[in-house]
């Protein structure tokens, strides 16, 4: 079940009324070609998204400039674990036919919840896992997702185009083809309680963008 748009708009309106300075901060960032997204908006979205059995639970989001702190309760190979990390976006390759993000993880921590005697629980409790290099752990995990294309030390590289449902989505590809020739996301970080998307404009891509827009409208 999708998140109701009307409920999201009502909540956004109430948030703006209660936090008038937020609009001023967003406008200030917009002048510098930055999109400022309140972290409260992400928290609201997560809290109001219909739950699923496999989804992380009790998700927390905290700013750790320039990184973002993420915490969640997850099922790790049959073991309930409270995990957290600081995630920094090192590089974004977003263009027509490409959606690759390079992440750097730090302050990774895991704690077994409840009584558990699984091999994973034993490794976590003994401290045998080197959490300072989470990429090395991700590299050898079973059933590695297709979007995880590279992992080493504290680096994780995700390529969403390796997900067939994403790569073959005509609307998504049309939007990328329309927007990315003109506007590129050159960076992503946190500042205060905002997620900041740094944009870079290129007027030379307007002809390609217009052609992609026509194809999208025709399709």
Image: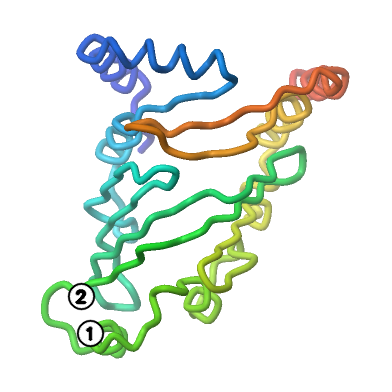
Q: Where is residue 161 in the image (x, y as percent from the top left)?
A: 68, 52
Q: Position of residue 110 (x, y in %)?
A: 28, 71
Identified at 25% across, 61% down, the residue is 73
Vertically, is 94 above or below 142?
above
Vertically, is 49 above or below 219?
below
Identified at 39% across, 16% down, the residue is 25
Does label 1 or label 2 sit earlier along the sequence?
2
Based on the displayed image, in which of its 4 quarters is residue 11 positioned? top left
Identified at 34% across, 88% down, the residue is 128
- Report the residue marked by disc 1: 125
Q: Callout 1: helix, strand or loop?
A: helix
Badge 2 crowding class, 10 Å Cα cut-off, few under 14, some 14 to 19, many 20 or more, is many
Q: Nearer the viewer, residue 172 or 148?
A: 148
Q: Position of residue 146 (x, y in %)?
A: 61, 65
- Report the residue marked by disc 2: 112
Q: Nearer the viewer, residue 4 or 29?
A: 29
Vertically, is 211 above or below 150?
above
Vertically, is 182 above or below 85?
above
164 horizontally vs 128: left or right: right
């Amino acid at each position: 079940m999708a998140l109701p748009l009307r409920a999201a708009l009502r909540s956004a309106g109430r948030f703006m009324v209660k936090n008038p300075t937020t609009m001023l901060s967003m406008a200030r960032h917009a002048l510098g070609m930055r999109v400022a997204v309140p972290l409260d908006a992400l928290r609201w979205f997560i809290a109001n998204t219909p739950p699923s059995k496999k989804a992380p639970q009790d998700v927390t989001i905290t700013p750790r400039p320039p990184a973002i702190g993420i915490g969640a309760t997850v099922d790790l190979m049959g073991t309930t674990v409270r995990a957290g990390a600081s995630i920094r976006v090192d590089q974004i390759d977003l263009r027509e036919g490409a959606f690759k993000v390079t992440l750097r993880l730090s302050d990774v921590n895991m704690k077994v919840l409840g009584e558990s005697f699984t091999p994973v629980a034993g490794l976590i409790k003994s401290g045998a896992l080197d959490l300072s290099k989470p990429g090395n752990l991700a590299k050898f995990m079973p059933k590695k997702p297709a979007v995880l294309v590279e992992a080493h030390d504290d680096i994780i590289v995700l390529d969403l185009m390796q997900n067939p449902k994403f790569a073959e989505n005509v609307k998504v590809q049309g939007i990328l083809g329309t927007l990315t020739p003109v506007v590129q996301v050159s960076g992503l970080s946190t500042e205060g309680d905002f997620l900041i998307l740094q944009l870079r404009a290129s007027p030379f891509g307007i002809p390609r963008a217009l052609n992609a827009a026509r194809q999208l409208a025709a399709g």
